[in-house]
Amino acid sequence: MIAQLTGIMKNEGKSGEDRISQLSDDVLCHILLFLTTEEAVATSLLSTRWRFLWRMLPFLDIHCSKPIIKSHKSVNTFLALRITQNITRFHLKCNSHSCCSHYVEQWVCAVKARKVEHVDISLCMCHRSVINFATLFTCATLVTLKLEGLFNLSIPSGVHLPKLKSLHLHIHAFTSFSSIRNLISGSPALELFHLRQNWYLSHFNELKIVRNSRVIQLFQRKWFYNLVIQSDRYYDFVPDYLDSCSRSNIVKAKVYMTVFGGIKDFYANQFVCETLKELCNVEFLSLGDFRLEKYPFSLDLLLLKNLVELRLSLENRDSMYMELPGKCPKLEVLEVNIMDDGCGANQRCKYRISGGVREHDLSIVPFSPETTLLQS
């Protein structure tokens, strides 16, 4: 874009008129918003009219700290040249080996002091180390925060983010639920929390929490299962879920659990049993298990004493999950989806339950995948 500006100004110079430089500061600064900070600084060479414009920009968009530090010795020396004190947006992206990790803490302290609102830091090729972002987690002006890289993240116990609405963390290290609780409790305006942790190529953990005017939703995903919990906006189950000892307090929420782990995955069996024990008081449960082969196991569970509606989606009728209805004394509706009955067809059955006995069928609908596709 700088080359284009230079070309336009040269052509206009031949006619004796520089119409671009005659534009107002606001318009010229808007043009510079489409450039990185390094490119914006380079426009100071175009003419005397452009010399100080980059110092008025309310953002920093840096792809590598090296050129800036090399020219200005330090982060603070560079920022001292700016006319505009506040920085509304800070974006640091670096793919080189540990180049920017040496300076990132300096940048963070500097932009916080200038009342930053939006921060996006991506150090994808950074060496694996602990980077101190503690300053960011007490930034009262922050509205959105995104951190990505192979670094370990240390979250302080005292989080104060009163204006934060969106938080994305894509990091390498394990982050405990206690740290996540600190983040969420210290962010009362938070609408979206998204955490993704990668340990190996195929092993990951993902947690997303969404709050809006209608619902509260929690999505948790690992390489062998999906878990979704949902409630209306007046029933906040998230603090109880993030404390595994308090999950039995969750009642008025819908739980959707799907297991799709590898063949004979022991961890999937363990997860199902532990999760059902922890969420033993919910009123609604949808459980799907689509593994073709499984380790044999028994559902040694407590009673699901509050469960009113149960949906099962299974590969065959011989599943151990067929024991579940007998552990639900208040069950009113049971839906069973058999995905393969051995004859290449699927079947969906729904029953009304009264006193632990099937009272009558609400629906018995045999269907095949081909039929379903045609109907949809």
Image (spheres, rainbow, N blue to C red):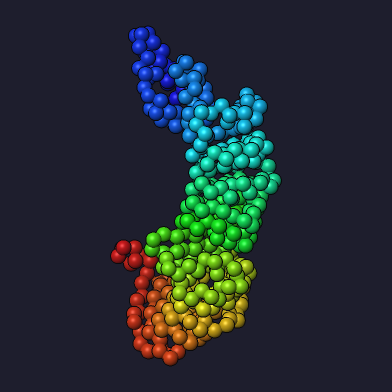
- Image quadrant containing the N terminus: top left
Residue closest to the far right: 129
Taking the spot 36% from the left edge, 8% from the top edge, the residue there is 16
Q: Quadrant of residue 106?
A: top right
Where is residue 231 drawn, in percent x and y? 44, 68
154 vs 144, left or right, is right
Q: Quadrant of residue 291?
A: bottom right
Q: Quadrant of residue 92?
A: top right
Where is residue 356 drawn, in percent x and y? 45, 89
Q: Is residue 83 above or below residue 166?
A: above
How many numbered circles are shown? 0
The residue lying toward the viewer, choosing from 206 and 57, is 57
Taking the spot 50% from the left edge, 86% from the top edge, the residue there is 326
Q: Is residue 126 above or below residue 301?
A: above
The residue lying toward the viewer, choosing from 249 and 264, is 249
Q: Is residue 228 above or below residue 107?
A: below
Where is residue 128 drawn, in percent x and y? 68, 45
**From this viewpoint, is residue 339 visible?**
yes
- Image quadrant containing the C terminus: bottom left
**From this viewpoint, is residue 338 visible?**
no
Taking the spot 35% from the left edge, 12% from the top edge, the residue there is 17
5 vs 301, left or right, is left
Residue closest to the far left: 375
Taking the spot 58% from the left edge, 81% from the top edge, the residue there is 301
The residue lying toward the viewer, choosing from 331 and 10, is 10
Q: Is residue 30 above or below residue 22?
A: below
